[in-house]
Image (cartoon, rainbow, N blue to C red):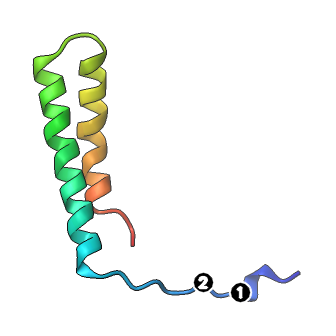
Amino acid sequence: MNYGSETKKKVSYSGAVDKARLMVGLMMLFAGLYFGFFSAGAGIGFGFLSVMASPFVMIAER
């Protein structure tokens, strides 16, 4: 089995997918800031993780 010769198919995305990814990232950012500032205990950890992950959602590889 020669796996090196296989080629990956290129998947074409429309602009709607990029807009959806951006909106999800922004919602994660705002939710993270909300939970980070206005909650105590586990909410602070959830807020921190959401804020840290939101840029990666927004710029995720296609």
Q: Which residue is mark 1?
A: 6
Q: Which residue is mark 2?
A: 8
Report whether 16 appears left or right of 38: right
Estimate the x, y position of residue 40 in percent, counting from the top left. 20, 11
Residue 49 marker: none
Give amino acid for label 2: Lys
Mark 2 touches mark 1? (CB < 8 Å):
yes
The part of the image, by quadrant, that contains residue 15 is bottom left
Report whether 13 appears left or right of 16: right
Q: Is residue 59 above or below residue 46?
A: below
Q: Residue at x 31, y 15 (%)?
A: 42
Estimate the x, y position of residue 44 in percent, counting from the top left. 24, 20
Q: Residue at x 17, y 24 (%)?
A: 36
Dividing the image into 4 quarters, which one contains the C terminus? bottom left
Give the Cα separation between the discs numbered 2 and 1.
7 Å
Report whether 6 appears left or right of 57: right
